[in-house]
Amino acid sequence: MRLLLTLGCCSLALLGAFPLLIGRASEPTVQTVAPVPQRHQLLGLSFETPLPFSPPIAFGENGVAVVYPANAVPGEHEFMVSLIALPKIDEVLGGLSDQELGNWLRFTQLGGSPATTSAPVERAILGRRLRGEVRYLPVPRPIHQELYFLQLQGGQRLALLLEVQDQVPLPVMEEVFNHVTASLQELPPRSPAWKRSFQWRNNP
């Protein structure tokens, strides 16, 4: 199974150099590469996508997402990057462990259930090796999900969800996910950019 493969080892220069045709005709096709990486500023973070993702859209009650293709109908995207605001430590649910929070998110927002099989995964995020978990959801369509928990300055906590349609080849998935996670940066708290990142609903 693909999720058992060691992640983070691919360094193929597939993106940014030329248009991609991936897989057979029955598989999704990445039709165009952004001339320059696309920068997003959301919920106190900044990150890049190497493909032209959508403007921010609401994800659940406390989250925001960008998807590829940019005009994809929700639920029919090939890639999705989501950030979900989590309760503070002193709030209800704030004392849950990462595993308990993951199960709660899976049950309430991400699909699957606490019983869905998961495996550990690591990526370089915000200057350190961060451990998360990867799950495979076979229905309603095959999806590969990776979930990480981020502790930001000032006590803010976020969940980072990386999602890809299972038919997308592993090297392409790795190239996109690695670009996103390697480019993640915290915006200076209370700076103009930080404040704008929470006003994404007003910036179509």
Image (cartoon, rainbow, N blue to C red):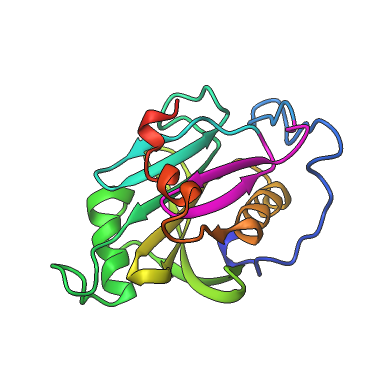
Q: State the image coordinates of residue 3 (x, y, percent, origin top left).
A: 56, 61
- Residue 153 among those drawn in magenta: no
Q: Residue at x 78, y 42 (%)?
A: 15
Above or below 134: residue 60: above
Q: Residue at x 35, y 53 (%)?
A: 84
Q: Residue at x 34, y 46 (%)?
A: 63
For the residue pair 6 and 25, the one nearer the viewer reads as: 6
Taking the image as drawn, is residue 111 in sight? Answer: no
Q: Residue at x 76, y 37 (%)?
A: 36
Q: What is the quadrant of residue 98 in the picture?
A: bottom left
Taking the image as drawn, is residue 86 in sight? Answer: yes
Q: State the image coordinates of residue 131 (x, y, percent, origin top left).
A: 50, 75
Q: Magenta segment range?
A: 33-51
For the residue pair 36 and 114, the one nearer the viewer reads as: 36
- Residue 36 among those drawn in magenta: yes
Left or right, 180 with reference to 96: right
